[in-house]
Amino acid sequence: MIEVNEKDLLRCPTCEAVNLDKGKENVCRRCASPIYKHKKFKTEKSWAYLITAIIAYIPANLYPMLITSQFGSREGSTIIGGVILLWEHGSYPIAAIIFFASIMIPIVKFLVLIYLLISVKYPIGKDSKVNKHKLYYMTEAIGPWSMIDVFVVAILMALIHLSNIEIIAGTAATAFALSVFFTLLAAHAFDESLIKENR
Amino acid sequence: MKIENEDVLDELVICPQCHTLHKEIPIKDGAKACCSECGRVMYRYDSRLAEHGLALSITALIFFAVANFFPLVKIELLGSEQFITIPKTILSLFDNGFYVVGMICAFLIFIFPLMIFSLYLLIFTLLKFGVREQLSKELLVLLSRLKPWSMSDIFLISILVALVKLIGYAQIHMGISFWALIVFVLLDIYLTRNIHISEIWMLRKRVFLPKNDKEVPA
């Protein structure tokens, strides 16, 4: 017989099996993947990815995302410039989608991750009613959708390839894709079991 | 709470969304168990899970092949025609020197979706015939690692966004691939929503447990 405290039960992030928290090096009894390796550096990995993502997000907004070269003249538009242009042309739904995917989602995700990373270490918002598990689950679900803009640029570049009119991706495309990639890594590196410990 | 050994923990389940602890109860064939706190589906019981999974993954792979071989969209602009396929979209990124974006896109919309459905196919085949217990475990771990990195659904929405941007400038014709991609994405969503990875683990336990029991008394 083992005496088990219900609070000591962990959910394996890989296979979702319920596991006993044995303190140090937890290995899932079903799929054998580590549940969390670094007892000492719990949030550092996630912080590192997140900061990289935020740094990459700056050039993503400053450089042009899309360069249209038409009859010899080149014209670049940044992410926000593209949204404004679409709005002025009257394609409101597309402007809204791009705005949400490329501006809202990344910023909300940065803020939520920063909040989660700080709140698991310091007693900020300890008695607030925010369900952090749900918050994390939401960011995981909406995160990948910010890739829309990168895919749109890739499609337009492959499609509009004429002698007179050409669409080329800008520097921002690389920066933005990297930013999204690192935010996804940061979210995956975040250890959900820390939420429980500090609730 | 007292338990005898760690295997008893299999009777417990933690809700993936709100992390509430529940006790697993046997449910009817085809029924589902939802979390009492947040209402999210936690697990289902399907006695023919391996067959359903096999059927779905084979269908999805066929549609994925179609989606990659045929033109996605064709446009007519200033008298000349252009069409794209999924591989052509990725290659044009490489041609223009965007190697990083090209690599990311290649993995997210081609390699990972293909790998995920091949893994589903392999895992369900192994479980159907009840062979290679260790291999099925490793493949399942790989599958759950890859799962969040497939973005076919997002790519599909991106195609629509790109086309709406082109309305008024060019004539647009949808290709066979576009419809195949829609079917593939729908199958992907259906499979993700209806066959949870933890259910495959439960199936794996049901498949391999009787064999282990027989070995112990002998």
Image: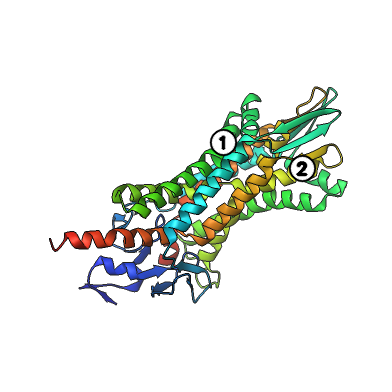
Q: Is residue A172 above or below residue A8?
A: above
Residue B215 appears anywhere in the view: yes
Q: Which residue is at a point 35% across and 50% down the rendered structure image? A: B136
A121 horizontally vs A5: left or right: right
Q: Do dots 1 and 2 share one subunit? A: yes
At label 2, which amino acid type do we have?
Answer: Leu
Q: Quadrant of the N terminus of chain B?
A: bottom left
Q: How many marks?
A: 2
Label 1 vs label 2: CA separation? 21 Å
Q: Badge 1, how many Cα within 10 Å: few under 14, some, many 20+?
A: some
Disc nearer the start of the sequence (1/2): 1
In the image, residue A121 lies at what x, y percent? 45, 59
Residue of label 1 = B106
| Image quadrant assignment for residue A24 | bottom left
Q: In the picture provided, is B165 more to the left or to the right than B188?
A: right
Few, some or many residues within 10 Å of mark 2 (<14, 14–19, 20+): many
Q: Name above or below for residue A172 compared with residue B149.
A: above
Which chain does the residue under circle 2 lie in? B
Q: Would you name the residue on which mark 2 appears?
A: B163
Pinpoint residue A105: horizontal percent, then vertical percent: 64, 53
The picture places residue B110, in percent across and down from the top left corner, at: 56, 39
Question: Which quadrant does the C terminus of chain B fall into?
Answer: bottom left
Q: Secondary structure at mark 1?
A: helix
Say which chain tag 1 marks. B
